[in-house]
Image (cartoon, rainbow, N blue to C red):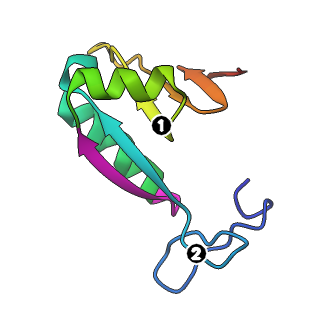
């Protein structure tokens, strides 16, 4: 799907945006919203398809402020240990395999 959108990989494996910059996202998380290992796992999966991820732990209050102001690229909250997880982007809410447009 990313190839079809024109987001081709460069020689180092990162997807390139139309403006020639690497496709990257800032992924800030709070450990209150889920274990750090889960956030690293999600980062790994984004990077597997060529999306560069800047992962950073931040205080819960700072993360909530960004979420409520819609000033985030990706957010994960209350990840379940059972393997079920949800994450939100500025435009989509994704839970399990269902994708809903916000």
Helix, strand or loop under label 1: strand
Q: Earlier along the polypeptide chain: callout 1 or callout 2?
A: 2
Measured in 3D between alpha carbons, the distance from the residue under mark 1 to the one under mark 2, in whole angstroms, is: 19 Å
* Residue 76 seen in the figure: no
Q: Is 11 positioned to the left or the right of 32 in the image?
A: right
Residue found farthest to the bottom: 11
Are dots 1 and 2 in contact, CB under 8 Å?
no
What is the span of residues highlighted in magenta in the rendered image? Answer: 48-57
Instruction: Determine the image quadrant of residue 82.
Output: top left
Q: Choose between 75 and 71: the one closer to the eye.
A: 71
Whether 57 is drawn above or below 98: the answer is below
Tag 2, which secondary structure?
loop
Please provide percent x and percent y for residue 80.
31, 13
54 drawn magenta: yes
Mark 2 lies on residue: 21
Q: Is residue 65 visible?
A: yes
x, y (%) of residue 57? 21, 39
The residue labelled by disc 1 is 74
Q: Which residue is drawn at 54% across and 71% down?
A: 22
- Measuring 58% from the left and 69% from the top, which residue is drawn there? 15
| Image quarter in which the C terminus is found | top right
Q: Residue at x 46, y 50 (%)?
A: 46
């Amino acid at each position: 799907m990313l190839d079809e959108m024109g987001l081709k990989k460069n020689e180092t494996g990162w997807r390139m945006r139309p403006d020639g910059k690497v496709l990257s996202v800032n992924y800030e998380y709070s450990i209150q919203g889920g274990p750090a290992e889960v956030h690293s796992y999600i980062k790994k999966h984004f990077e597997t398809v060529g999306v560069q991820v800047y992962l950073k732990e931040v205080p819960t209050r700072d993360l909530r402020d960004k979420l409520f102001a819609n000033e985030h690229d990706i957010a994960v909250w209350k990840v379940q240990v059972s393997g079920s997880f949800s994450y939100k982007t500025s435009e989509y809410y994704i839970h399990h395999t269902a994708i809903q447009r916000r």
